[in-house]
Image (tube, rainbow, N blue to C red):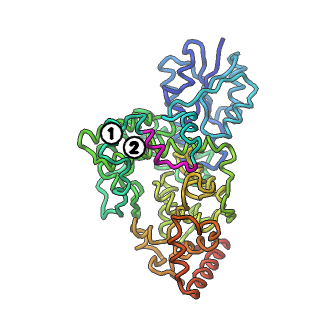
């Protein structure tokens, strides 16, 4: 009896549990480009094009290995527009008894497949290092779910950077060595650039021309082999200085020493453990320092696995949480409107061009601004999900709702990740070409981050005054002259009023 095997656009791995469970001789793989997945948020055109290209190449690989593949293109006149619709259509067409699939990474799709009127079997996604049960067992009974301790367990489980039962070099974490300010110049040429499928680019330009983001030039890897080329290229040229400058930001330098493989990891084109093993090998070969290698591996087996655990543990309502009661609409600056804030202009412009920004730009520029300004976290979440090519809800939502916006009341972060303009000044050269003056705390030219920082602390005093990591901030605020505090709050209110009116700020 024929059975359908669903492969989603972020499950492009030959080691997918649904494929391992299937019978190549009798089962039919179903893959579909559908408007329901392409438009539930206004995805960046590059993300849509990347997904469609990678899906098409993966389907070709499956057929070459002997699989029967029922593939639906977006412009197929029989396309039903949804994953469940395509499964139902293909089941009728093939006379299939049911469908087997690997658990999706978004509750929205998990629920849709569970309610489908077909006999179905959902399998665990074994591409991750920690299963749901492992994370639940680790989290059970803990008052605080801090990533650092989970990460150490993942190191022990995988054996990565372990010297017997001790961490390599004697320390678990070398983050202290990974906070150097922006270098004067970058001597790594950035990511490899691959030729795109022009048919897909034409399709996406016709169907999604109104979406935020530049479709061309398109240079992403779209096959596992190309993704592996990019990984090797980065290990050779970018990894040695990645640790030192991973938090740095430079005008017109979107990539610095970053790997740009998150697109490929999250789509299934690269295996996370294999990636980490290759990075570890560079350290043991003497080609990369320990602080760089440990910092990267922590992002993959620590943070990436941890946020997935949080997403599934917290459940479908996680994205609706708003612990601080923020309700301001997302300003137009996030969609490329002119701004006098150079840090925001730089971060949004490269997001528009590349569907990419690195973690500090996301956390300490666009995320920090949203938190300080009191923007509704649901709006912030939808923006991040829409504009980044590596954004899937399981990884994006905890990073935004929890880490960036503190909307989950501290499940992930022990305090809000807020800063004045001084942090951005320290870690970038953005402030030198900004219309505002980071040195000014008040006045017409004062950096908005300076005003909004104290405004945030003042309006949330009852919530955070007892937080041991924030006590010093409140002591500094309380020692200020009362007239200065009043000036800061008045000017912050005036600035936010202009923001609400749609003025260029």
- Which residue is denoted by mark 2 in the rendering? 297
Could you say where residue 286 lies in the image, as x and y percent from the top left? 23, 42
Q: Which type of secondary structure does the marked residue at label 1 adopt? A: helix
Q: Would residue 67 be found to the left or right of residue 301 on screen?
A: right
Q: Quadrant of residue 272?
A: top left
Could you say where residue 489 lies in the image, as x and y percent from the top left? 61, 80
In the displayed structure, would residue 465 be above or below residue 37?
A: below
CB-based contact (under 8 Å), mark 2 and mark 1: yes
Magenta span contains residue 358: no
Which of the pair 463/118 is nearer the observer? Answer: 463
Category of crowding for the residue at label 1, using alpha-carbon neighbours closer than 10 angstroms: few (below 14), some (14–19), many (at least 20): many
Which of the pair 141/272 is nearer the observer? Answer: 141
Q: Is residue 77 visible?
A: no
Quarter of the image where the N terminus is located: top right
Going from N to C along the chain, the mark reached first, 2 or 1, is 1
Could you say where residue 363 lies in the image, as x and y percent from the top left? 51, 58
Q: Would residue 58 be found to the left or right of residue 91 on screen?
A: left
- Which residue is denoted by mark 1 in the rendering? 280
Q: Residue furthest left?
A: 286
Give the residue drawn at x 45%, y 43%. 151
Q: Would residue 455 be found to the left or right of residue 89 on screen?
A: left
Magenta stretch bounds: 143-154
């Amino acid at each position: 009896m024929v059975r359908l095997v669903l492969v989603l656009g972020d499950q492009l791995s030959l080691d997918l549990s649904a494929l391992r469970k299937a019978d190549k001789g009798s089962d039919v793989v179903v893959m579909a480009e559908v408007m329901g997945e392409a438009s539930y948020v206004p995805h960046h055109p590059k993300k849509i094009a990347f997904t469609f290209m990678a899906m098409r190449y993966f389907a070709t690989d499956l057929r070459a290995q002997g699989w029967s593949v029922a593939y639906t293109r977006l412009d197929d006149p029989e396309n039903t527009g949804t994953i469940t619709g395509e499964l139902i259509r293909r089941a009728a067409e093939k006379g299939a008894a049911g469908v087997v699939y690997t658990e999706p990474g978004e509750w929205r799709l998990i629920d849709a497949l569970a309610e489908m009127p077909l006999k179905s079997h959902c399998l665990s996604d074994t591409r991750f290092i920690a299963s749901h049960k492992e994370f639940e067992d680790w989290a059970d009974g803990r008052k605080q779910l801090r990533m650092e301790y989970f990460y150490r367990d993942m190191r022990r489980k995988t054996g990565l950077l372990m010297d017997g039962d001790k961490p390599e070099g004697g320390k678990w974490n070398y983050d202290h060595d990974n906070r150097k300010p922006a270098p004067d110049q970058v001597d790594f040429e950035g990511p490899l650039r691959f030729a795109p499928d022009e048919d897909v680019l034409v399709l996406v330009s016709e169907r999604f021309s109104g979406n935020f983001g530049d479709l061309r030039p398109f240079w992403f890897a779209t096959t596992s082999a190309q993704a592996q080329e990019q990984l090797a290229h980065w290990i050779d040229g970018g990894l040695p200085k990645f640790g030192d400058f991973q938090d740095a930001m430079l005008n017109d330098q979107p990539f610095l020493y970053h790997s740009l493989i998150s697109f490929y990891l999250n789509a299934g084109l690269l295996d996370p453990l294999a990636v980490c093993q290759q990075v570890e090998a560079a350290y043991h070969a003497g080609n990369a320092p320990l602080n760089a290698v440990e910092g990267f591996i922590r992002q993959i087996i620590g943070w990436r696995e941890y946020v997935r655990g949080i997403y599934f543990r917290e459940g479908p309502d996680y994205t609706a949480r708003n612990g601080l009661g923020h309700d301001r609409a997302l300003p137009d600056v996030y969609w490329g409107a002119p701004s006098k804030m150079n840090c925001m202009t730089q971060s949004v412009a490269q997001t528009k061009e590349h569907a990419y920004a690195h973690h500090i730009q996301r956390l300490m520029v666009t995320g920090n601004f949203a938190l300080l300004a009191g923007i509704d976290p649901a709006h912030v979440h939808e923006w991040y999900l829409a504009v980044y090519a590596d954004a899937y809800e399981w990884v994006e939502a905890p990073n935004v709702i929890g880490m960036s916006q503190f909307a989950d009341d501290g499940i992930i972060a022990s305090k809000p990740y807020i800063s004045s303009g001084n942090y951005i000044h320290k870690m970038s050269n953005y402030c030198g070409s900004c219309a505002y003056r980071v040195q000014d705390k008040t006045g017409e030219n004062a950096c908005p981050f300076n005003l909004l920082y104290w405004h945030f602390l003042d309006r949330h005093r009852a919530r955070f005054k007892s937080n041991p990591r924030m006590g010093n901030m409140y002591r500094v605020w309380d020692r200020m002259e009362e007239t200065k505090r009043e000036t800061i709050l008045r000017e912050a209110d005036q600035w936010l009023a202009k923001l609400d009116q749609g003025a260029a700020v």
